[in-house]
Image (cartoon, grey):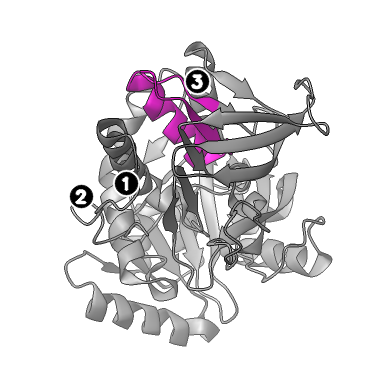
Amino acid sequence: MNINIAIIGAGLMGRLIALSLTRQGYKPTLIDKDDTNARNSAAYAAAGLLTPLGEAMHCEPNIVEMGMESLKLWPELLTTLNGESFFQQDGAIMVSHTQDQGDYLHFARYIKEHYPQHHVNSLNRSQLEALEPDIGRAFNQALFLPEEGQIDNRKLLIALATELEQADIQWLSNTEVVEIISNIENTQVSYKGLDVEPLNNGCVTQTFDLVIDCRGTGAKPVKNLTDNKQSTLSDLRAVRGEVFRLYAPNVNISRPIRLMHPRYQLYIAPKGDGHFAVGATEIESDDMSPMTVRSAMELLSAAYSVHAGFAEAHIEQSISQCRPAFSHNQPQIIVNNQTVHVNGLYRHGYLISPVVLAQVNELINLHHSSGSLKHSDYSHFKYSHLLPIS
């Protein structure tokens, strides 16, 4: 197809959108300030949890519904990839220590009251032992959320990169976008990078028919509007998260585990062959410095309280990363002339990205048929009741 499209940001959404475009016959240009391995992205640092009910007390109902819908969409999407990927939907388990039973009971009541259509099973010790023997030894009761799941985020990023490289698209890695100027007819993107031959002021400026901006926290502060109005992304902020990657061959856990706690919910996500992602922290900060001692002690102590085998675990990585969020913690798709901003996925990137992708695809189809997104009505899109486009 002759439409010249750029995708800025090669994290999870950028890769999903780029691959979708190539399969529709487009040849998009992918621009990202990171290497193709994406190790500096929020998508790489994530745990890949697909647990909408587990998040329900800390997000709006539309996020839960998008998560449930995405659980249906992920398997179909993954079957189209030739590379190695991992998707599991064997449920998740919620536990708490005796002193934190209040939070546990509050969560159980909340799910029963607000999401009665979804199954939640209360387990006693023997039932928990039958499901997860290693967990049953430490807890007297648990909640089993059978619809929950997880994905291996790192395997997925690699598989997506492999598909894109085989599609032979133009992928400008180690390339930073310094300005986006969106006009009625097109969008001009100025960028600089290691493999870019500079023309003006050290930058290259290229014109595209359509630009999809998926930079996450890299999009703030934004200087991409020429009408002197406040940027539509000025509300974007960074929320710091911290996670450990552990190798614990003596821990046999097959499903995601959440530990209720007065200050946070610890998650333990098994990634196979004794590897685990352990995290919980959520700090209102754009600080990208290494993990603090306090966070490390709290995370590791909480993991040990779930399973004593974590005491002998090897710490493979401690990761700090910032996730993009707006003040209402809702994702947004914002159309500005011939630029589409996809941002604010917060802690829910893997949880809701298939629904976000479907909305973006409808925008691309609309652009292809009409040549513009200006003054269009998006209310008829399939998921606009969950994720309206502004």
Which element is circle 3 on?
helix
Numbered-mark total: 3
Q: Nearer the viewer, mark 3 or mark 2?
A: 2
Check disc 1 and give the amino acid type. Answer: Gln
Residue at x-position 81% and y-position 64%: 292
Q: Which residues are magenta?
A: 1-29
Q: Are marks 2 and 1 in contact (CB under 8 Å)?
A: yes
Calculate the distance from the C-alpha at mark 3 to the C-alpha at mark 2.
27 Å
State the residue in front, 288 or 365.
365
* Quadrant including the C terminus: bottom left
Crowd tier of the residue under label 2, counting other residues whose Cα lies within 10 Å: few below 14, some 14–19, many 20 or above = few
* Disc ID at residue 382: 2
State the residue in front, 71 or 268.
71
Residue at x-position 67% and y-position 46%: 246
Residue indicated by mark 1: 359
Mark found first going from the N terminus, 2 or 1: 1
State the residue in front, 382 or 307.
382
